[in-house]
Image (cartoon, rainbow, N blue to C red):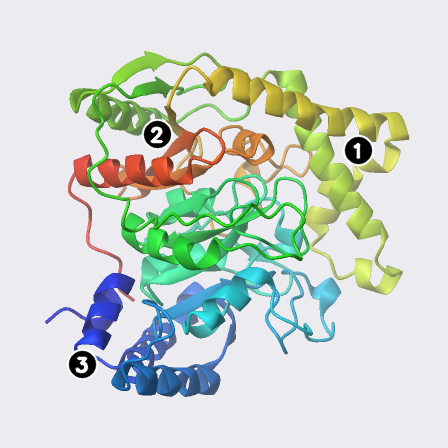
Amino acid sequence: MTALHQLSAAELAAQYADGRLSPVEVTTALLARIDAWEPTLNAMYRLRREDALADARAAEARWRAGAPLSPLDGVPITIKENIATRGEPAPIGTRANEGLPPAAEDAPPAARVREAGCVVLGKTTMPDFGMLSSGLSSLHGITRNPWRRDRNTSGSSSGAGAAAAAGYAPLHIGTDIGGSVRLPATHCGIFALKPSLGRIPVYPPYIGRVAGPMTRSVGDAALLLNVLARPDARDFMSLPQDATDYAAALEGRALKGLRIGLLTDMGVGLPVHAEVRAAAEAAAQALASAGATLAPLAPFLGAELFDGVLRFFEARSYADYRALAPERRAKVLPFIVEWCTHRARHFSGEDVMTAYNSLVALRDATVRATQPFDYVITPVSPILPYEAELPCPGNDPHNALPHIAFTAPANFSEQPAASINWQASAEGLPIGVQVIGRRFDDRGVLQVARALEQLRPAQAPWPEP
């Protein structure tokens, strides 16, 4: 018999519908799964044990009455810490925000999953202010990778990535402004979608920032996107209502004739590990063998443009840091302080505008480079999972984001991009590949990811405590 934590959201819903399983039974089992993993993983910020069981009982009653709120009614889910949930604080990973009052209302992603009847198990961890793509936080400590506890999850949706790989729930929601759902996805061996900007409303809205599903399968992500992709007036970038059923549209996409670009070296940031490059090449070749047309894509993110993007992130974080009272600044992770102050404290207004203009130039460069193709295949992170204790690869606060060259462009071009696990490294560590589509073609990115899911090599069994 398949263990309950191995079942997908779709399988759970089917068994709720015919009475073979109950949401209470599943929630109880997943809470036990979390208890077994948490002493070593540290992926949860808040666990809503009693509230989750109460929500599960309500969902069970609705299924028995034949009146579920949605196909995901009673399916367990976790939500990243920085997505506001009513009555709970959101300190965004830093001790500087300890003691903040609880949120007065749900942010749009949390509101949508509650409306759908999902059982919210709790909130997942993230690093200080969501920066530096790691599992290290001054508030939470270290979130570890289930595949190897001495390795990093990457971030900033670090807890969500670890929780998905460990089987805490079939569904998880993260956020992404430079790679923060895709980087944990590649390091934790799961699937994640960074949707087109506005596809999933967020609050507060911000340039490049999205929420996205993080799951063990493409199908579950599509089911969750059906719930999350609904307009919300609080997000001024929210896209109009789209009647697409992303789950129903997954299968049967013809690959013959699709124009696929392959980019394996951006020319900036960290060198691409040989096994990471080989995975991207193999994934692209699998699409070509299925009928797609494959062509190389030249690097389009030069050193000057990439540095402008890094300066933007530094200036943004420095402004957040300076806005804190002195006693709160003292609680921020020292590495973060050094990173966001060493250059940004000297920035002039002209420097800040130049950094912002780099984002505009990046958008232009990304769209122009990818436009000749229907989809583009790249690595997600240029490296394999690094040491768990480090705040970034290389542990250099003056060069803390050298690993986001493949992911950040799609944030600021507003294009959908996904990470799908392809294979394991020689050390048994996950390696994902990125699928980038044209703006608004979230359905197509999911379809190509689903095709890769079917074409990829046999996958390793999921890790156990």
> Which residue carries the number 2 mark?
276
Indicate the position of residue 140 as horizontal and vertical percent values.
58, 65
**Left or right relative to 394: residue 316:** right
Residue 125 visible in the current orientation: no
Tell me the mark number nearer the camera, choosing from 2 and 3. Answer: 3
User: Residue 464: which quarter of the image?
Assistant: bottom left
Indicate the position of residue 439 as horizontal and vertical percent values.
49, 32
Q: CA distance from mark 3 to mark 1?
A: 60 Å
Indicate the position of residue 448 as horizontal and vertical percent values.
29, 34
Residue 275 visible in the current orientation: yes
- For marks 3 and 1 on the same chain, the one whose residue lies earlier in the sequence: 3
The three-letter code of the residue at mark 1 reads Arg
10 Å crowding of disc 2: few (<14), some (14-19), many (20+): many
- For marks 2 and 1 on the same chain, the one whose residue lies earlier in the sequence: 2
> Which residue carries the number 3 mark?
19
> Which residue carries the number 1 mark?
343
User: Residue 348: which quarter of the image?
Assistant: top right
The three-letter code of the residue at mark 3 reads Gly
Q: Nearer the viewer, residue 299 or 72?
A: 72
SS at circle 1? loop
Quadrant (top left/top right/bottom left/bottom right) for the C terminus: bottom left
Q: CA distance from mark 2 to mark 3?
A: 44 Å
- For marks 2 and 3 on the same chain, the one whose residue lies earlier in the sequence: 3
Q: Nearer the viewer, residue 206 or 18?
A: 18
CB within 8 Å, label 2 to label 1: no
10 Å crowding of disc 3: few (<14), some (14-19), many (20+): few
Indicate the position of residue 307 as horizontal and vertical percent values.
67, 24
Q: Is residue 125 above or below residue 283?
A: below
10 Å crowding of disc 1: few (<14), some (14-19), many (20+): some
Q: Is residue 397 above or below residue 366?
A: below
